[in-house]
Image (spheres, helix red, strand yellow):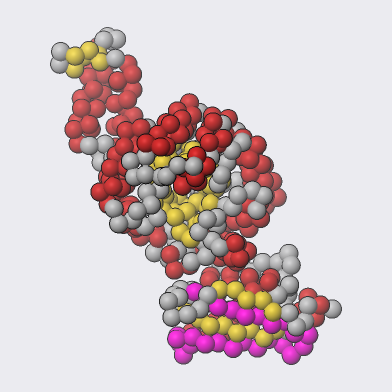
Amino acid sequence: MSTAEVVAGKCGEAGRMGKDVRSDCHVTVELRSQGGVTVELKSRVGAFYGDAIRAQVQSVLRDLGVAYARVAVIDEGALPFVIAARVEAAVRRAGAGEGKKSLPEKAAHKGGTAQDRLRRSRLYLPGAEPKYFINAGLHGPDAVILDLEDSVHANEKDTSRVLVRNALREVDFGAAERMVRINQLPMGMQDLEEVVPEQPDLILIPKVEHAKQVIEVDQAITQIAQRLGLTQPMWLMPILESALGIENAFAIATASDRVVALTIGLEDYTADLGVAKTKTGEESLYARMRLVNAARGAGLQAIDSVFGDVGDIDGLAKWGEQSRSLGFEGMGCIHPMQIPVIHKAFAPTASEIEKALKIVAAFDEAQAKGTGVVSLGSKMIDAPVVLRAVKLVERAKQMGIV
């Protein structure tokens, strides 16, 4: 007896429809015990792509072992990877396809990212909204975050992880590092099972308070990778979002060799303190500095929170400049228009670069002469100043400024 016969009569739905919906579709799957598969399609592009959509639905059902079903698709301009994800999610919700997947053809992706790569901007993309995926890389963020946590309604966690999985396989995010923010543990373990096989570059772990949470995620990734023979690096970025998490920052930073950065979630942190989050950030200064110190002590990057007021560009610029002065190397963003502002805020100024280049040149000259004394004009330059100048020049080169 087939899966469809066991659960005949059950229905499952997934996806969205309506006049304000784009790049998505709504799929209803009714399992039957006989009669093959029928596909009812309503689409604005049905005259051009109707046959292809119906064929794809049939293909997904075959992959999932469903031989008898009535499928209704209301298409709002969905791409094939979205249609496949919505059909699979609807089948699962109907109680079929257990232990099976229907995977789109995998596009060519770069083979992992460097541990110390630029992470000035990380653009959050709600995991339930495919319309934001398609052009995200064109905005030039250093990273995109396919978010399965706060931006996804509790009722859509299951469908979103399938959608994000397919996006990781098929969407070209350009030069952006591909990150996934999983749900808070233990639900996040289900996310890992779905997305780790598609080898995202980095996993964001929300609401981390103890090192053991990082270890748990690390071990789960390792087990999945060993099972599938994956060798590409997969980094971790814990998000500290509570007073306890901040106090345990260094232990969290050193919990796994996969950890490349620490970041902070200020909405949850200020809620935990019971204070209002402000645009000037005095209420979170201790937490941000503690995180920077822990990250630096562990040899990691420190990444600041998002700036939530999309319309306040001047406020964003000031926040970014302050973040850089505190030792942060980047921050999150929730709208593409924030990206260039953030990049400018975290870039060394022309005068800083000029001064750093002079210090580095003076150091090189002193080395060539075999003297340990470095001077710039009438000023003696200490070793820590030289080191800071070298780092600034290296970062400017990474950004393409020098």
Q: Give the total of numbered labels.
A: 0
Residue 234 in view of the camera: no
Name the image quarter holding the N terminus.
Answer: bottom right
Residue 282 x/y as whole percent: 37, 36
* Residue 113 shown left or right of residue 401 in the figure: right
The answer to which image quadrant residue 98 occupies is bottom right
Asked whether 303 or 393 is in front, the reply is 303
Residue at (28% x, 47% y) in the render: 315
Magenta highlight range? 24-48
Above or below, comparing residue 230 to residue 108 in the picture: above
Q: What secondary structure predominates along the stretch shown in magenta?
A: strand
Residue at (39% x, 64% y) in the render: 135
Residue 104 x/y as whole percent: 57, 68
Residue 167 x/y as whole percent: 52, 63
Above or below, comparing residue 340 to residue 321 in the picture: below
Residue at (64% x, 48% y) in the render: 185
* Residue 229 shown left or right of residue 346 in the figure: right
Residue 216 in view of the camera: yes
Name the image quarter holding the C terminus.
Answer: top left
Of all residues shown, which one is farthest toward the left? 377
The answer to which image quadrant residue 134 occupies is bottom left
Above or below, comparing residue 288 to residue 203 in the picture: above
Residue at (37% x, 44% y) in the render: 278
Residue 78 x/y as whole percent: 48, 75
Asked whether 170 or 210 is in front, the reply is 210
**Magenta run includes residue 35:** yes
The answer to which image quadrant residue 60 occupies is bottom right
**Magenta run includes residue 363:** no
* Residue 123 shown left or right of residue 92 in the figure: left
